[in-house]
Image (spheres, rainbow, N blue to C red):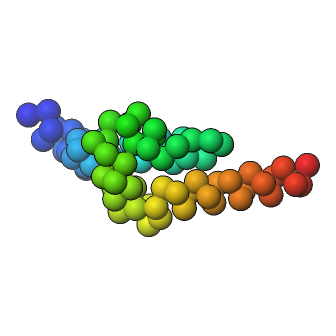
Amino acid sequence: HLSRSFRRKWGIGLKPFFMRQKIAEARRLLEKEGASVTDIAYELGFSSSQHFATCFKAMTGRRPSEWAGLAGKARGRAAAGK
């Protein structure tokens, strides 16, 4: 009943909703300097870092390590501009 009500109200099922929330938090954590992909995967409740990487890429189009690398480059550019 909860799942059907949630889908009617928000237009998305519970599982996809929570996955979106996890990936949004993962993106935030990956943008922090020194965050480990494996640590983030386990912190967010994924069964393995591989499963996390698969889900992350499916939703963002990039591997977690790529996302972290892009964030690091952006931090470097911002620091250089100060």
Which is nearer the eye, 82 or 40? 40
Residue 10 visible (yes or no): no
- Asked if residue 78 lies left or right of residue 23, the reply is right
Residue 56 visible (yes or no): yes
Residue at 15% of width from left, 38% of height from top? 3
| Coordinates of residue 20 in the picture (x, y in percent) | 37, 48
Which is nearer the eye, 44 or 7? 44
Which is nearer the eye, 3 or 51? 51
Figure quadrant of residue 50: bottom left
Quadrant of image for the N terminus: top left
- Asked if residue 9 lies left or right of residue 36, the reply is left
- Residue at far right of view: 82
| Coordinates of residue 49 in the picture (x, y in percent) | 37, 48
Callout count? 0
Q: Is residue 70 above or below residue 17?
A: below
Q: Is residue 57 above or below residue 42?
A: below
| Coordinates of residue 80 in the picture (x, y in percent) | 88, 54
Residue at 71% of width from left, 59% of height from top? 73
Residue at 47% of width from left, 64% of height from top? 62
